[in-house]
Image (tube, grey):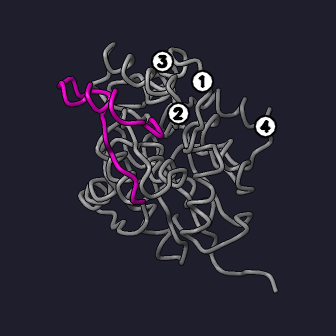
Amino acid sequence: MPDNSPAPILCDLDGVVWLSHQSIPGSVEAIAALRAAGHRVLFVTNNSYSTVETQQATLASIGIPAVGDVLTAAGAAATLLRSGQRVMVAGGPGVVEAVTGVGALVVARSDDNSSKADQLRTDQEIDAVVVGFHRTFNFESLQRASRAVRSGAMLIGTNSDATYPTGDGLIPGGGSILAAVATASGVEPVIAGKPNAPMGELVRRTLKLTSLENCWMIGDRYSTDGAFAKTIGAKFALVTSGVSSQTDAERLREANKFELVVKNLPEFAAHLGVLV
């Protein structure tokens, strides 16, 4: 029998719900309306820096309860690890949380300039280097992470986003850091976040669904959010409240034949008939 329940909504955060954690006008009300209409809303983000608890708390601070509804690229990256593996983290607290959450061991950090970090690098085999956005990346970090990869560690990127949207414009994203480590080590990374399969598997586990064809993915970046919708077989709505202009969005829709271009979350909710 067909599933007539309201479709799950997979919602990006940066550029869709907020910019630099400042809510985009109408987004809070749109999420509330979608939930009131019975839609399960998951926040699927390539932000790997913040912990899940921090992102839940930030959503709560703008009026969106989100406990159990936040999936991060760090969490997707952790699905590629095994309990007991030794990991070097080139990322933020969210990566550390995700790595330890699956029983892997954080034995080194690329941004730790202490002698202990150098000792760990030489005395312990590193099974994986997990790279995400962080602001303490420098030449020594690059040297330490790439050396571990050249010595045999698996290179995992939480995401490949070259830029990150803020209220003051774009800044370099985690993908830019990952590109530096990959170039210096000569190794192609495995990337976990949108638009890649590990994030899709994390969504399926959370929703307890094998097929996501009834789901909507809402994002501001076709290269990640739109491609992710294709990866998992979901419908896609591109919002122009983040990195994509209206002109670019319409051009992308024409070229890639996805379902919808909207200005923001309220316009998407109105499209589903849950917000006037």
The residue carrying mark 2 is 155
Asked if the residue at tag 1 contacts the one at tag 3, i.e. Cβ–Cβ closer than 8 Å, the answer is: no
- The secondary structure type at the circle numbered 1 is loop
The relative height of residue 113 versus residue 275 in the rendered view (above or below) is above
Q: Which mark is residue 187?
A: 1
Name the N-terminal-most of marks 3 and 4: 3
Asked if the residue at tag 1 contacts the one at tag 2, i.e. Cβ–Cβ closer than 8 Å, the answer is: yes
What residue is shown at x 41% (from left), y 43% (from top)?
47
What residue is shown at x 58% (from left), y 44% (from top)?
194
Q: Amino acid at mark 2?
A: Leu
Q: Nearer the viewer, residue 130 or 67?
A: 130
What residue is shown at x 60% (from left), y 45% (from top)?
262
The residue carrying mark 4 is 256
Give the distance between the C-alpha atoms of the residues marked 3 and 4, in whole angstroms: 30 Å
- Is 261 left or right of 59, judged from the image as shown? right
Q: Which residues are magenta?
A: 102-129
What residue is shown at x 23% (from left), y 28% (from top)?
112
Give the distance between the C-alpha atoms of the residues marked 1 and 4, in whole angstroms: 30 Å
- The secondary structure type at the circle numbered 4 is helix
- Is 156 left or right of 49, judged from the image as shown? right
